[in-house]
Amino acid sequence: MEGVSNTAMREALKLLEAEFLQNSLTDWLLALLIAALTWSVLLMLRRAIAARFANASETPPLWDDALLEIASGTHRLLIIPVAIYLGSLRLDTPESVRSTLNSALVIALVVQVGVWLNRLLVMWLQHSRQQRLTTDPSSIAAINALGFAARLVLWSVIALLILDNLGINVTALVAGLGVGGIAVALAVQNVLGDLFASFSIALDKPFAVGDFLIIDEHLGSVEYIGLKTTRLRSLSGEQLVFSNTDLLKSRIRNYGRMYERRILFKLGVTYQTPREKLEKIPGIIREAIESQQKVRFDRSHFASYGDFALLFETVYYVLAADYAMYMDIQQAVNLHIHARFEELGIEFAYPTQTVFLSNNPG
């Protein structure tokens, strides 16, 4: 039995020392073990970081969010080339195989770094939008445009690095893309016009999300400012979509930038109103306005003789842009004036005609 076991041991040692593709079976097993350990360690590290920062407080620091994004953005398939490369270092491989493994490792690392940077950029954009939403809503469009440009540049650089690593002449490719880009730009000049118009909106900030706009006969609140279109929600509920180029060519009335509202209204009383009561009307109107809050009285005058009424013109300011507040104040002013006119017996005018009949005998 001892002789049989020794023979088996010698056969096993010979098998381990046998060469397969210029490497012994022992080297292949060690390479496989190194690759498996690398794969396992990197996956456990990824899960540990994700679990550690996923259970953080509801408002974790920005760096915690960044580490969580990096851990979540580490793709399993991109770990495989790293594990294979580290395992292959134990093997004696031909130059062509080594070059292929090097290229695969570089491409995997470049793509992984691109994924990390893209996720970090998206996280930063979301964080900036949330901060600016209350303090400076007009800058959100600029942040969106900046984010689009940054991501476009990022993936363009990643693509060029991958192509260069594959042995493609990137210089000639970039030159060819420049010539082709001119042709494409001519073909899609309308799209590019909207794109540059969106950058103009982002930089000049004529309006922001939440502003109430009147554009020709259309009106609504800004819901979204995109790279090609801007979308408004009308008062009747439907969505209005404008191309950015057409929008900048239009005359826009932005009520979102209104700090106070100027109100002009007229009322008329009958021609039969005595003069001493007419003299009291501007004071009554002023009293009605100044009894309200957040208003500034400007003037009230007996303005003109109308067709069927004596007309008074009044101007005051509501010290806010809210339309509902203005209507509440105007309603209170009207009710106050109506009550005072009832007390003094002053009649409001309405369209009337006086017909004179003449009886001519014979």
Image (spheres, helix red, strand yellow):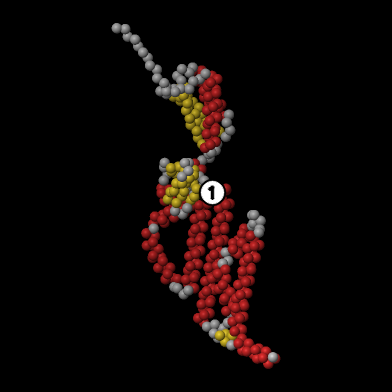
Q: Residue at x 52, y 49 (%)?
A: 138
Q: Residue at x 53, y 25 (%)?
A: 337
**In the rendering, at what x and y percent does residue 52 appear?**
66, 62
Which quarter of the rendered picture does the C terminus lie within? top left
In the image, farthest residue toward the left:
362
**In the rendering, at what x and y percent does residue 359 appear?**
34, 10
Q: Is residue 93 above or below residue 313?
A: below
Q: Is residue 254 visible?
A: no
Amino acid type at mark 1: Pro
Which quarter of the rendered picture does the N terminus lie within? bottom right
Q: Nearer the viewer, residue 171 or 12?
A: 12
Task: Tell me if 356 is positioned left or right of 293 in this view.
Answer: left
Q: Is residue 39 above or below residue 135?
A: below
Q: Is residue 278 above or below residue 240?
A: above
Q: Secondary structure at mark 1?
A: helix
In the image, farthest residue toward the right:
2
Q: Residue at x 46, y 75 (%)?
A: 167
Which residue has dot 1 on it?
137
Residue 18's image quarter?
A: bottom right
Q: Is residue 73 visible?
A: yes
In the image, farthest residue toward the front:
1
**In the rendering, at what x and y percent does residue 88 appear?**
57, 79
